[in-house]
Structures are given as C-alpha cells and as structure tokens.
Amino acid sequence: MMEASTLAPAADAPTSAAAPKDARIVIENAVKVYASAGEAPVRALDDVSIRIAPNEFFTLLGPSGCGKTTLLRTIAGFEQPTSGRVVLDGVDITGQPPFRRPINTVFQNYALFPHMTVAHNVAFGLEKSGLGKDEIAARVDEMLALVHLSGMHRRMPAQLSGGQQQRVALARALAPHPKVLLLDEPLSALDLKLRKGMQIELKRLQRDTGITFVFVTHDQEEALTMSDRIAVMKDGKVLQIGPPQEIYQRPQVRFVADFIGETNFLKGRLEPGGVARIGEAAVPLASAQGHAEGETVTLAVRPERVFLHPGEAASPDTLGATVENIIYFGTDTTYHLRVDGLPDPLVARVQNRDQSSPTFGQGARVRVGFPPDGLSVLRD
Amino acid sequence: MLEAIRRSPRLQRLLLIGPAVAIVVVFMLLPLGLMAYVSFLERGQYGGVIWDQYTVEAYVGFFFERDFLDNLVVNTDYVSIYLRSFLLSLLTTVIALAVGFPVALYIALQPPSRRKLLVFLVTIPFWTNLLVRNYAWILLLRTNGLIDQWAQGLGLTDQSISILYTPAAIAIGLTYSYLPFMVLPIYASLEKLDFRLVEAAYDLYATRLQALRRVVVPLSLPGIAAGCTLVFIPCLGAYVTPELLGGSKELMIGNLIQLQFGASRNWPLGSALAFTLLAFVLLAMLVYLLRFRKLPE
C-alpha cells in the first residue's frame, strides 16, 4: 500500500477548481509521453491538472487523439503518467495497479467476459470484497434491478443486445460501489434512440448512487446534456473547464467555441470603455478580462444570440447586413447574412415563437446587433 | 452427358464430393481395413500371413501367452509397454503444456510484426529431419555428452551423468519434438483473445494470476485442448525418438509394433497392437469432443 500523503493546495491551482478537501480525485500536472523509435515523441497528456468533486458528473470532451482516453486510463491505472500525480481522497495512488484502486471502468466495447453468465460478470468484482455468498447474490440482484435487467442472471453476454450488454457492463462496474466510475465512450456503439435513453439513464444512476462519474466522449451534445462540469481537451491539453452553460456561452478559446455548437467568429479591436470595434459598430462587451485595449481579438457569438432588426435605422452598436440565404427549420429560421465591412458571412438564428416574430426575405436589408454577454473574447 | 449433369443437382453434388470421398476411401479406409483383416489371420511361419486362416489369436496374445501345456497365462509385457507409453505421453503433454503456454502467451502479447517472426522461429525445427534432430539429442544427452560435460564443469556432479537410454531421455526428446504442436494452437486461440478483457479483470480487482486463471485460461481452453491432443496422440505412436533415445530397453508402442512386423515376424499381432492403439486414440478423441463441444468461442 502507498504511503498516504495529504494533499497540499497547489500554488498554481486554477481559481475555479474545488477546494482540496472537496476533491474526490485530483490529477496534478499529469504528463504522458509516448516515445517510439524513429518518430517524434507524442505528448498524449501535456501538463493536465483537474480536480473532480465527489458526486460530480465530470466529462472529458474532445476530438479523437486529444488525450481524453489516455487521461481516463491513467486514472484507472492502466497507464502510468510520465510525470505528475493521481490523488484519490487525498491519497497518492499514482503507482498503484488497477486492482488496488477503488475505481471501476465501463469500457467502450463493454469487455464483458464472454464465458461467464450475466450474474457471474456482475459478481466478478465482488469476489475479493470479502462479502459472503448470499450478500454477493443480493448485490447482483440489486445491480441488475438498477439497470432494469432483473431475471437476466443466467444469460450469456452473446445472447444480449448491444443496449443490454451496455447495462450489464454498467452493473458490473457499479457493483463493487467504487469511489469513481470511469466511462470510456460507453454510448458510442448504440443507435441514436437508445443513446438518448441511456444518457438520461446514466444521469439517473449517477444521482441515485452518488458515485463520481468521469465520462469520456467526443459528442458535444452528450457532454452538454449530462455533465455537471466539462473539461474540453485538445492535443493533450485541457483548454477549458466549467459547467456546460459556461462552456457553451463563454468559450475562452477558439477551439472550444468551434468544437461545441455553431459559432460565428468576428475580428474586432478592443477600445476604451469595454467596447469592441467590429466593422463600423462599437459593441459593448460584458467582459474583456485579460486583454489589453487596442488589441485585435477574435470574438465568438452563437447564432441564436445575434439580434436582427428590420430596416436601415442606424445606431452606433449595430451593423448593416443583407440576407443572403434563408433556411427554415420549423422551430427556428437560420439566416445567412453578408455584413457590411466584414469579410466573413454571419449566421443568425431566430426562434419562430408566434406570428409576430420578424421574418426577412432574401436580399432584405437588416441591422445586426449583439447582446454584451453574447460576445466572448477568445484566446488563441 | 453435360446436359444430364446440368439438370441433376444430385449428380452435381456427387461429382463435387466424389474426389474427397475417394481420397478417404483409398488412403484411409482401405489400409485400415487391410490392417483389421490381417489382425484376424494366422501368422505365417517366416513372416507374412496365411490369407485364408482366421483366428483371434493376435488379440488373445495381447494379454496372454501360452505355456508348454497350451494353457493361457497372463502376460503383462505388452500391457506394461502400453502403460509406459501412456505415462510417457502424459508426462510429455504436461511438460509441453507447462513450457508451451507461457511461450504462446508471450508471442501473443508481442506487437503483430514481431509475432510473425516468433511463430516462424517456433516452426524452425520442422525444417530439419526428425532423425537428425534426435541424433543431436544423443550427442547432448550421452555420457560425456555436452550436458554431462557442463554439469561436471560447473561442479554440479562428480560422476558422469548419463541420461541417454532412460525414460527421461525419451520424455525430453518427445517434448522437444512435439512442443510446436502445443505452442501453435494455444497461440492461435490467444491471438484471438481480446486483451481488453484482461484489463477489465484487473479493473475489477483481479491480480495478474487471477486474471490469467479466470479469463485467459478459460478463453484459450479450445487451443489448450487441441494442443494437448496434438501432442499426446502422436507421442503414443512415437517410433523414432524412443528407438534412438530410449535404447533397446525402453520400448514404446511404436517400437513394439515395428518389432512385430520386423524381427518377430508376427504380422497379425502387430496389426492387433496397432488397432488397440487406434481404439484408445479414438476413445480419447471422443472424450475431447464431448467435453469441448459446447464451449463458446
């Protein structure tokens, strides 16, 4: 067993991170370098630091090859970080093998034992728990009921559908009551309808069991709907950590804004008084923290946050534009606009609430406005 | 003619399956039938058989011999040779499994490019004649052979050790000869094994040894069973290795049968011995089939 070391608050800890005593799992400056002969070494994890609170649904989101699975495998113990620490409840577990860690994994391909029944699969992690035979049987019953598979005890994994196998994998990983449950893209093999159902199901399981979930996905919608907090990763680095609303509404990096949802990017110059000069307009900003006046920056605005006003009535904080294309979606309408003085087209989405919602024809002249909190100033 | 074939699916089937059936009949059933027939014939005075005199004397002779008064007396000579063959084959199989499984596992855990090379290395002994390889073992095992010299040079023993012409020499020779037959089928089933299952076992608190016992071994059982069969059955009928390494004292079934057709000039007994061996082998196959028929892949 590793010597227990209490965790001192790191000096460079991000301000948004939870206090150390509230952290269930802490990843400190994790670096993982894969070196292969004749090739440049790959930094799969590049100085990653994350704190995850107890009972949190935490998602690692990013494109394939961003290091999210490597990070998950580092927490599970399948990979050793080149440097850095993994701390669980204040105890450094970096060197511990997977079978010593009270952490279980739901694997992407489920990895059910094909030669064992459903019940034996679920009981596998309980055999070393010191529980009696009856207690194990009771726990297996309880777990199968939890994932709505009661009575499936004697089936073999090959006799189950993909969705059922998924549930068995969940029951198997939850049965030993781990402190942390790791989920490696568990929904990617399911069809859309089943996936939607399982998203709700997973969220329910996480609330009911109170176990900390660390969920890996490349699906931004999945991340937004399920998570308490999201860490967006790219090239082995964590770009931004925050609740879904913050990640969506206030992206700090161009990649985050681009990867999650649809975004318009605008070039602007910061001016005195918290104002950005975009083309002819001077648009007030909610926050331009960390950026100097006179700096030319990239601003992000979601299509649904773009306001459209009819007519040409000039005001200093709006821009003139021409409607180029109209796409009707039922619940809303998307307008592709050519904005005066801007090189790139702009996309605006207007909700079709009732008859009074404004509609614009092709070629119509409109004025475009942005709410101050809809504009995010991006770092590159 | 062609038109008739085209019209009749039955004729098409017959024509397609015909060559295979012909091969089985000509190369398997005919020789076996001939052997069975010979085993029920009277032996000829100077070898060969008398083709129209039928008797079960050969099968009686397996267990009994006739004394001077023509009474049947139990003769354990042949049975003990069979028993020795079984025990030696069993020992060989166990050693080959103990050595072969880790080798197969090691190969299966290598990157794919290196696996090919290692499998090739395992099969390399096949490129040399079995006879030559067994003579090589004579040089290694004999008194004042390489192993003896090393043992004395290292001070492990004062006297010269002689392994040659003992059952141990046969076991060593057989294990060496048939090890690839153990390694290759086990490797074939381990290669298909999804090693993420091993990770899943680690994740669920199984140690390395437990993961091996609970996941790797059960899932490679078909390969292990095939390997054991492929080693055990040829060992039973082995001829060259016991002949060269066992000397004249340590007969195995193969040598006994050869003796009947050669020096003893008792073809019917030789055929009967061979048939008894075949019966045992078929029994072993049957047990194997019944045991592993229902295993999932």
Image: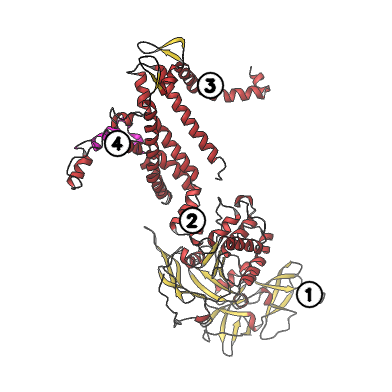
Give the CA distance from mark 1 to mark 4: 92 Å
Give the mark nearest the N terminus, 2 or 3: 3
Q: Residue furthest right?
A: A355
Q: CA distance from mark 2 to mark 1?
A: 55 Å
**Secondary element at tag 2:** helix
Q: Nearer the viewer, mark 1 or mark 3?
A: 3
Using the rendered view, name the quadrant where residue A10 is placed. bottom left
> Which residue is disc 1 drawn over?
A353
Q: Amino acid at mark 3?
A: Ala
For label 4, the SS is helix
Give the residue displayed 63% in from the left and 55% down from the top: A153
Q: Are marks 2 and 1 in contact (CB under 8 Å)?
A: no
The chain containing the residue under callout 1 comes to A
Q: At which x and y percent is residue A142?
A: 64, 64
Q: Say which mark, if any, is on residue A212.
A: none
Which region shows up in magenta?
B123-144
Q: Are marks 1 and 4 on the same chain?
A: no
Q: Amino acid at mark 2?
A: Val
- Count residues near mark 1 (Cα–Cα under 10 Å), then give few for <14, some for 14-19, many for 20+: few
Which amino acid type is marked by label 4? Ala
What numbered label is drawn on residue B198?
Answer: 2
Q: Mark 3 = which residue?
A: B22
